[in-house]
């Protein structure tokens, strides 16, 4: 639809546009004597001059989609010729869901279909005044990992719907594409609006954790809205959430708990992972072990632990892999806890091979064949599944004083990455690949790797009697 000067807004809609420009949102947030306070807060932040990125959600039923659609509708009507976007993980979901909501919003506020046109072939909505909303497919494509397909686009602002489904790369690229079309002319601050339910992805790290710690950057804003705070929601919907037997869904969608992740591929529950800290049910055998994930060529961290059975009693993290320091730590702990070489293991890939040779200890090769002919893709997968079994049986423990709060959060995040993955053509079980984990966490899962190496001894335990010297006639 080209800009059409012969079309003008109906008076009632023109009044709403003017109210919107003046920051009066009651015609959106108020109905039947009730007010949606959080929705009003979101619209105020989306139209202020102080914030750039706005995350709105934190639970189901907060009128997130309605808020996003109303914001874009009135920005398009108020500022002719501006350009916006709606992005979701799959384009078909915009067409099947988000666009349906957009049409309902238009009908509610009197924006008839003669004022805008939906181009289904090229996927955009264009208004009579030249404003436009592009509908973007944000699906991750291995052929375009950096989302360069959006690199030349210029938008006034935009909306990422269902941020829990969206890859970090899409967010990271699109935030650089807003504020580039008529913002200066209209005095509009660039805005990236993100709506979501709780999800432990980039939103958790970039918005929720800093918000919870009261250190969210000034240009970012997080609005938590629970279903109970939406005065217009059907009470039956609330009751359905309250009575669900799925604890994860209840925590995430009703209580807005970001620490529960709804992932059907997860091998461990969040509660069982949290239980390892200070676990008084863990298995302690009096046999001590050392496991270590050695950072490759100075990257990431080296993590080493001393275990009593399946309980960690000593721990060290090296920010850089200086082999002499790592080797000294291992030999010192061997003497302190009387740990023989055959109960010490570090990863043999990369620089870890030097530690294996110099300390004369066991080497863990991630890609090696699994033990006992079990149906796993490789040794790392086998030990990952075995670790999950021990965690779910509440057999793994860590002395609480050994880890800081940030360490604890990292360990939980990494153990949540113990997930099944699509099987090989030969049906072998796989773990979620490290490359995929790095995309989600932004780092290598060093804690996870150090922990799963303990399971190597489940298949290679050498049971040496305490009176071995007497048996051999050495005493």
Image: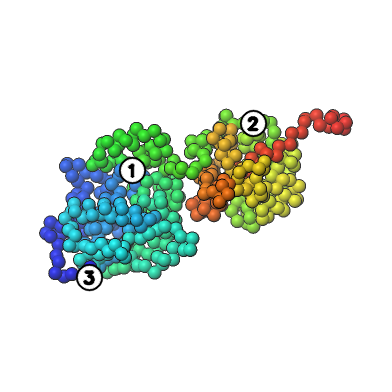
Which tag is nearer the camera, tag 1 or tag 3? 3
Q: Are marks 1 and 3 in contact (CB under 8 Å)?
A: no
Residue drawn at 69 percent across, 33 percent down? 287
Give the Cα distance between marks 1 and 2.
43 Å
- Residue 416 percent across, percent down from the top left: 51, 43
Q: How is the image coloured?
A: rainbow
State the residue position of label 1: 60
The quarter of the rendered structure image containing the N terminus is: bottom left
Element under label 2?
loop
- Local packing at callout 3 (Cα closer than 10 Å; few below 14, some 14-19, many 20+) is few
**Marks 1 and 3, Cα distance to the nearest angstrom?**
38 Å
Q: Is residue 69 left or right of residue 329?
A: left
The answer to whether residue 21 is left or right of residue 256 is left
Q: Which residue is rendered at x = 67% and y = 41% of the image?
A: 372
| Residue 242 sits in quarter | top left
Residue nearer the viewer, 365 or 257: 365
Does residue 107 lie above or below 253 as drawn? below
Q: Which residue is mark 2?
A: 284
Marks 1 and 2, the one that precedes in the sequence: 1
Q: Quadrant of the C terminus?
A: top right
Q: Of 190 and 434, which appears nearest the observer? A: 434
- Asked whether residue 124 is in view, the answer is no
Which SS class for mark 1? loop
Instruction: Identify the residue at image location x=39%, y=33%.
Output: 245
Residue 367 vertical position relative to residue 33 in the rendered view, above or below: below
- Circles 1 and 2, Cβ within 8 Å, touching? The answer is no
Number of numbered discs present?
Answer: 3
Residue at which label 3 appears: 2
């Amino acid at each position: 639809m080209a800009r059409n000067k012969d079309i003008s807004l109906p008076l009632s809609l023109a009044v709403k546009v003017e109210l919107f420009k003046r920051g009066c949102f009651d015609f959106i947030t108020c109905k039947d004597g009730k007010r949606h306070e959080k929705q009003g807060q979101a619209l105020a932040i989306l139209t202020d001059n102080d914030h750039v990125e706005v995350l709105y959600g934190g639970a189901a039923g907060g009128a997130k989609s309605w808020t996003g659609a109303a914001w874009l509708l009135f920005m398009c009507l108020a500022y002719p010729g501006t350009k916006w976007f709606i992005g979701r993980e799959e384009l078909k979901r915009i067409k099947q869901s988000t666009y349906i909501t957009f049409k309902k919003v238009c009908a509610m506020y009197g924006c008839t279909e003669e004022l805008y046109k939906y181009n289904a072939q090229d996927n955009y909505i264009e208004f009579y005044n030249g404003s436009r909303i592009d509908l973007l497919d944000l699906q991750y494509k291995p052929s375009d990992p950096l989302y360069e397909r959006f690199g030349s686009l210029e938008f006034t602002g935009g909306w990422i719907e269902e941020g829990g489904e969206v890859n970090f790369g899409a967010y990271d690229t699109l935030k650089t594409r807003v504020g580039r079309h008529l913002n200066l002319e209209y005095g509009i601050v660039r805005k990236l609006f993100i709506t979501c339910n709780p999800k432990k992805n980039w939103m958790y790290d970039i918005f929720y954790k800093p918000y919870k710690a009261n250190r969210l950057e000034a240009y970012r804003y997080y609005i938590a809205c629970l279903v109970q705070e939406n005065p217009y929601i059907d009470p039956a919907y609330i009751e359905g959430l309250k009575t669900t037997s799925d604890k994860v869904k209840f925590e995430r969608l009703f209580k807005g708990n970001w620490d529960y992740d709804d992932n059907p591929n997860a091998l461990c529950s969040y509660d069982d992972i949290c239980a390892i800290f200070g676990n008084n049910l863990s298995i302690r055998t009096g046999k001590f072990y050392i496991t270590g994930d050695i950072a490759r060529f100075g990257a990431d961290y080296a993590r080493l632990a001393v275990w009593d059975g399946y309980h960690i009693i000593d721990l060290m993290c090296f920010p850089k892999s200086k082999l002499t320091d790592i080797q000294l730590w291992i030999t010192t702990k061997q003497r302190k806890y009387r740990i023989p070489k055959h109960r010490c293991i570090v990863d043999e890939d990369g620089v870890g091979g030097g530690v294996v040779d110099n300390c004369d200890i066991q080497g863990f090769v991630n890609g090696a064949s699994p033990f006992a002919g079990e149906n796993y893709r490789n040794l790392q997968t086998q030990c990952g599944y075995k670790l999950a079994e021990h965690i779910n049986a509440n057999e793994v423990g860590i002395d609480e004083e050994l880890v800081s709060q940030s360490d604890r959060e990292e360990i939980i995040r990494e153990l949540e990455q113990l997930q099944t993955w699509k099987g090989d053509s030969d049906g072998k079980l796989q773990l979620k690949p490290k490359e995929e984990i790095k995309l989600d966490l932004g780092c290598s899962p060093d804690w996870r790797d150090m922990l799963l190496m303990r399971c190597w001894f489940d298949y290679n335990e050498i049971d040496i009697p305490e009176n071995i010297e007497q048996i051999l006639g050495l005493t």
